[in-house]
Every structure is written in structure tokens, then in C-alpha cells.
Image (cartoon, rainbow, N blue to C red):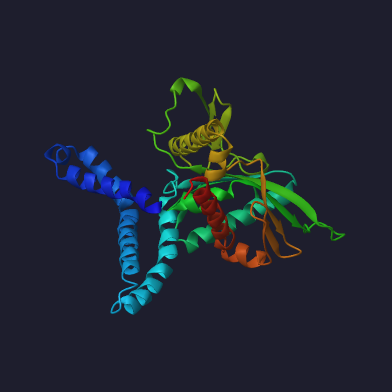
Amino acid sequence: MLKDKLQPFINRHEEINNLLMSPDITSDIKRMTDLSKEQSSIQPIVTKAKEYIKLIDDIDENKMMLDDPELGELAKEELKTLETRKPQLEDEIKFLMIPKDPNDDKNIYLELRAGTGGDEAAIFVGDLFRGYLRYAENNGWKVEIMSSSESEAHGYKEIVFLVKGDHVYSKLKFEGGTHRVQRVPATESQGRVHTSAITVAVMPEVDDVEVEINPNDLKIDVMRASGNGGQSVNTTDSAVRITHIPSGIVVTNQDQKSQHKNKDRAMKVLKAKLYEIEMQKKMEAEGATRKEQVGTGDRSGRIRTYNYPQNRISDHRINLTLYRLDYIMNDGLFDEVIDPLIADHQSKLIEANGL
């Protein structure tokens, strides 16, 4: 019974209240901060739980009065209102009881990389990057390019950028995977539709505590920065390439004039990549159920198709098709795809957790 599942939240909230008044806790800043955060995180469900328990009690009370000659009709009317509110409140509570992804409030690094399709893939990397930029603007988020490798066709072979703001990971975590684009290239004289693909990786921003790197595991090279066609864009050795020897991950950064800044940015991206690997390992260890619950950012899976001749965008995970590709890309209206993905994810979580 839902009422029984809610009582532990109320009990824990009261327990934290008592602890926060204890001199032992008030003198321990870290413990007090942790308890305050926990209290804030369960406050919404405690508020709804108290409302739900009162509603159940009111329903029981009114049912007992149905046979009362004086109060029966009044109780009947009251029951209608209460019974209507009950399923609404249950849905609200189930949503609040969904286990929270610990990464949901984090900033993210998005890595867009051209795959099959040559120049067309690189051009689409640029198109999708600009679409994400507009989406970030719509949400009041800030974007900072960490590294980029431009193609000769005015696109990007690869671009890595940091997105900062409220609930960034929770909104964009489902973007990881292979994005396929179908359109007629500008150089195509016969009007044939070409298919290209790019990969998107979504990596939460992590701090030093979450990912520890042994300096002995790193090979750091410095070199001259270069632009398109290999021409030198800098006369000093400012570009940095970091190789993480155990994993084989290589991160290069040359976007800043300072070698120190390039190294710092490359290290941040490396930590995010290593954290992503650990997340994948953990999900594999916990099995397919967990993978289904969190929505993996596996870049090998084809998740979405952008068909320009048909003005169609299709997300293959939830069989969603919209004929609004131009608006979504030009105006950054990705919520039209992301919101149904989140709703689907939440319904699976509710089912998986027996709520």
C-alpha cells in the first residue's frame, strides 16, 4: 500500500529535524550540510505524503458517515472530490519517488564527432552543434567550447563543449548515441539523398574527488597548434595532447594560446571521459535493468534520424516521428523530442520500482 511506503520518508524527515538541533551536529559543518541537503531532497515527497495520508483518512471518515441521515449526502459529495484527487496525488507521489540519477544536476561535456559520410558528416556536426547552442540559449544555459577540429567543408570533424546550467544532464543525457542524417549534399548534381552519421557522447562534468588520475598513467605531449590543412596558427608550443596509458584515451586541445589553459581543459575532458567509462562499467555490472532505468549514453546505438527532404526527425527508441525538423534545428526546439523521451524513461522507472 502506497501509504505504508510513504511513512519512512516522514520518519526520516523528523529524524533529520531532531539531528539538526543537536549540538553535536551544529558543530560539524559538513555533517550539518549533508543532512540539510538530504532534508531538502525529501521535502517535496514529505509534503505530498502528509497530504496523501490526510486524504486517505478523510476518505475513510466520509465513508463511515454515508449512512448518517443528516451528514450522508454531504459525505457523498465530499467523497467525490476526494476520490478524484486521490489518483492525481498518487501519480505526483510516484514521480517524486523515482530514484534520482546522481548526475542529473551536473553540467555536461558534449562531444560531437563525424562518422561515416565524410564532409557531409562534418557539416552535420556543425549543424547539430548550432542546434544545441540555440537549445542552451532557450534554457538559459551557458556554453563553452573546450576543443574543436574544423573540417575543410566548414563543419567540424570533432567538437567538445561544456554546457553549464540547471538540470543540464537530466535534459541532455538521452542525446548520447549515433545520429543519422539524410539529405542531398550541395555537391550532388543528381539530387540523390546521401546518408551520413555522427556520434554524440554525453559526459557529466566531474571534480577531482570523483575521478583520481595517477600522474604516472599520463603521457603529455606539447606541439605547435595547427589550423585547417595543417597550417600553423601559433608560433609557440601551446597545443597539448594527453594520453591516458591504461585506457588508451587521447585528448588534444589547442584552442587557447596558453599551454597551461590547454592542458587544464584537456585534463577536464579526460576526467569526464574516464568517468563515463566507469558509469558504463557500473551499468554493465548491475545488468540490463539498470541500463534501462538510467538511459545509457552508448554512442554505438543509432538513436535518431534527421531526414531533410521529408522535414522529418525520428527518434527510434520511442518510435517518435515529427515533421518539424526545420523548426527544431533552427530554433533549438529539442524539447519536442526530449520531453517524450523523459516521460517514457520515467514511466519505465515507475514500473521497474514497483510504484
| 184 displayed left or right of 246 | right
- Counting from the top left corner in percent of width and height, residue 58 is at 31, 65
- Single out the residue that lies furthest toward the right: 190
* Residue 334 seen in the figure: yes
* Residue 193 place in picture, x, y as percent: 81, 57
Q: Residue furthest left?
A: 23
Of 107 and 293, the residue lying toward us: 293
Asked whether, in this view, residue 12 is left or right of residue 348, the answer is left
Q: Where is residue 121? Give x, y as percent.
A: 70, 49
Q: Looking at the image, which residue is at 14% across and 45% down?
A: 21
Total number of numbered discs in the rendering = 0
Q: Nearer the viewer, residue 189 or 92?
A: 92
Q: From what the image shows, is residue 230 above or below residue 50? A: above
Q: Residue at x 66, y 43 (%)?
A: 301
Q: Residue at x 74, y 44 (%)?
A: 116
Left/right of residue 269 with respect to residue 194 in the rendered view: left
Residue in the image at 31% along x and 71% along y: 65
Of 63 and 207, the residue lying toward us: 63
Say whether residue 147 is visible: no
Q: Quadrant of residue 213?
A: top left
